[in-house]
């Protein structure tokens, strides 16, 4: 008996093209994208808040008590099945998030930032400054290389915080009190610290506690945003994401636990939509399996297997999908898994 699972995971892209004609999610249906673009510029002043939670696995958010992140998801488009297809470490991760290109262009491959090409592919704050030099951009980061390397030269105000979520929150709240603020990036690092210290695991109480602490801080940041004197005349888009997940006490590899991330795009004019991977399960009896053989997909080593066309596995040319094959050798317990995205 063969059971084939195919996982279709959406590509989720964020284009921070400021002029605030922002294509928020490349995976949104075109009619929803048109709705977003038509409603941005609704007479209110566009504002942007991006919150980064370093090393935060989506299943950690699901397991933890996160009322503020839940509220943001309820008021926008989100996915707990997004994917970091680049290098799963902070240097290249935040470089990709903030420049809009992968490491093949910005050239950051580790935390050293050696060979970075931010001159050619700058922080998106530069696009804001080019559109209007009077617009105020601010970056508040717990992991200082974001300001010292990626944002340097492109941001009006860079605030490196103490290594505490509380200080990140306090500095972000203070910046939200400046009425000329246009775009604010806020980075929390304590979830990543907890993962390295005791495990990136949704069953790890210390990891979940760190997520809940950051969620509480995010709630206070959102409240400060809503308490701005001109808030009723402002149109805020709020983006929340992470650079990578983790497995054990590390990251940087190619596992699903390290690559799977989350993306939240929230705001009053954002479509309410969850983007999730889809799973197709097809169980094929041995006598009528996908190789049309009467055995359990048996073939000699170094042999070639050709799978006939099957309409059940036709996902088209625009849909991402993964195929997983489980292979058993002569030893019953010796099962290998081969996956191809």
Image (cartoon, grey):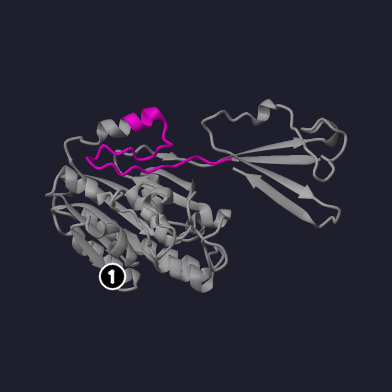
| Residue 82 vertical placement versus 242 (above, below) | above
Left or right? Give the position of 242 relative to 152: right
- Where residue 322 sits, quadrant-wise, is top right
- Identify the residue position indicated by label 1 in the image: 161
Left or right? Give the position of 307 relative to 211: right
Write down the region rendered in magenta. Answer: 8-34
Q: Is residue 240 visible?
A: no
> Which residue, as the protein is rendered here, is positioned at the far front?
115
| Image location of residue 293, percent across then percent down | 85, 33
| Image location of residue 36, percent across then percent down | 31, 34
For the point 52% across and 63% down, which residue is it?
251
- Where residue 155 sits, quadrant-wise, is bottom left
Q: Is residue 69 visible?
A: yes
**Nearer to us in this view, 52 or 331:** 331
Left or right? Give the position of 200 relative to 179: right
**Nearer to us in this view, 137 or 57:** 137
For the point 67% across and 29% down, which residue is it?
312
31 is within the stretch colored magenta: yes
Left or right? Give the position of 220 relative to 293: left
- Where residue 67 sits, quadrant-wise, is bottom left
> How many numbered marks appear?
1
**Considering the numbered disc 1 on the image, is that residue within a helix, a strand or a loop?**
loop
| Residue 14 vertical placement versus 185 (above, below) | above
| Image location of residue 302, percent across then percent down | 80, 44
How many residues crowd around disc 1 within 10 Å: few (fewer than 14), some, or many (20 or more)? Answer: many
């Amino acid at each position: 008996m063969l059971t084939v699972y195919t996982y279709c995971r959406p590509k989720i892209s964020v284009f921070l093209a400021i002029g605030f004609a922002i294509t928020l999610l490349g995976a949104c249906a075109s009619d929803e994208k048109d709705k977003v673009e038509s409603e941005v510029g609704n007479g209110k002043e566009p504002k942007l808040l991006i919150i980064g939670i370093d090393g935060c696995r989506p299943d950690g958010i699901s397991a933890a008590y996160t009322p503020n992140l839940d509220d943001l998801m309820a008021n926008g488009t989100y996915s707990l099945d997004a994917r970091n297809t680049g290098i799963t470490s902070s240097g290249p991760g935040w470089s990709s998030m903030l420049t809009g290109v992968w490491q093949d262009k910005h050239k950051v491959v580790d935390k050293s930032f050696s060979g970075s090409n931010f001159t050619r592919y700058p922080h998106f704050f530069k696009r804001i400054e080019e559109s209007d030099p009077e617009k105020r951009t601010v970056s508040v980061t717990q992991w200082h290389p974001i300001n010292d390397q990626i944002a340097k030269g492109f941001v009006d105000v860079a605030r490196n915080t103490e290594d505490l979520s509380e200080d990140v929150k306090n500095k972000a709240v203070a910046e939200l009190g400046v009425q000329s603020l246009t775009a604010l990036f806020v980075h929390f690092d304590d979830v990543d610290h907890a993962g390295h210290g005791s495990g990136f695991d949704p069953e790890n109480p210390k990891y979940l506690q760190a997520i809940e602490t950051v969620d509480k801080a995010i709630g206070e940041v959102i409240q400060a945003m809503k308490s701005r004197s001109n808030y009723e005349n402002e149109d805020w888009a709020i983006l929340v994401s992470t650079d990578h997940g983790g497995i054990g006490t590390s990251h940087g590899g190619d596992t699903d636990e390290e690559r799977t991330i989350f993306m939240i795009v929230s705001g009053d004019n954002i479509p309410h939509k969850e983007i999730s991977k889809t799973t197709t399960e097809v169980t094929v009896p041995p006598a009528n399996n996908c190789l049309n053989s009467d055995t359990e997909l048996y073939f000699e080593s170094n042999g070639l297997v050709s799978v006939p066309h099957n309409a059940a596995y036709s996902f088209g040319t625009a849909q991402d999908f993964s195929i997983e094959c489980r292979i058993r050798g002569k030893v019953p317990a010796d099962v290998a898994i081969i996956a191809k995205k």
